Amino acid sequence: MNRAQKAAYKREYAAAKKSGKPFFPYAVYKDLIIATIAIGVVIAFAVIYRVELGERVNPASTDFVPRPEWYFFFLFELLKIFKGQNAFTPVIMATFIIPNIMMALLLLWPFIDRGPERRPHRRPIAMLVALGVIGFMGWLTFLASEAPGGTASAEDIQLEGLTPEAEAGLNLFLTSGCTSCHMLQGVGAAGPGPDLSNEGAKNLGVQWQIDHLKNPQSKNPGSSMPAFANFTPQQYQELGVFLNGLGTEFK
């Protein structure tokens, strides 16, 4: 800010101060009114939109898809954006790097924008940054809120040509919580696992699928997929047949 701008600012500030009102009681009672309204709205929402109790927690369940509270939805969606086979990539980017960059920007902004102006219409860059951050978080929150939160059913996935063995594999795929990491025919999560809609086109073989289920690291070193070691031989066969036919036999 040059001398002329500083002098103009001081004149405007002095004029505004003369025509203004003292902090007490004018600003105090306005703050009190707004705070009372805000608390009243929160209480009203708590009374009208009551949180219902769900089913008892079942620690043995493998098909529950956890979801965070709404105020963490933007981080939840960031985990999907930074997806990958490496389990640490989405975690580090979404929960450490991006939030810390935004926090650093918030702390450093007063040192970057050192102008004395406090009126929004005279601080276009600061307002654009603030609105951009709020809009980005709001957009991610909306995307996460619209994302499917429960487990998929066989009716949600339309596949033709399923044999009885493959149909049993589909049901096992759904009840084992696979859609919490994989997408199939547009149903399920977009990560961190790959889309399995055309898994059969890789022509890996049924036995490869079974071995991968038992020990993912043996086929894909560094994979974040957990080992499914509690299936019966018949279940391994059913799931292997189902996966090996996706996109080829079963479309």
Image: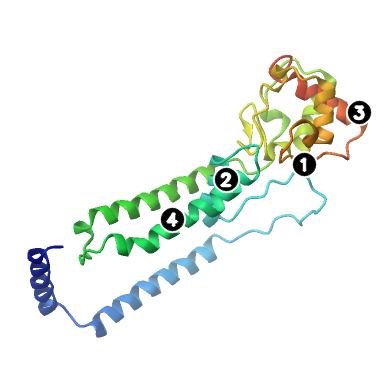
- Amino acid type, mark 3: Gln
Of 47 and 71, nearer the camera is 71
Position in image of residue 239 (x %, y %): 82, 28
What's the CA distance linking mark 2 and mark 1?
18 Å
Look at discs 2 and 3 and give the one toward the viewer. 2
Position in image of residue 162 (x %, y %): 77, 18
Residue depicted at x 8% and y 74%:
15
Residue depicted at x 8% and y 72%:
11
Earlier residue among tags 1 and 4? 4
Position in image of residue 96 (x %, y %): 54, 54
Q: Residue 234 — which label?
A: 3
Residue linked to disc 2: 79
Residue linked to disc 4: 102
Residue linked to disc 1: 226
Q: Is residue 239 visible?
A: no
Decide: marks 2, 3 in contact (CB < 8 A)?
no
Look at discs 1 and 3 and give the one toward the viewer. 1
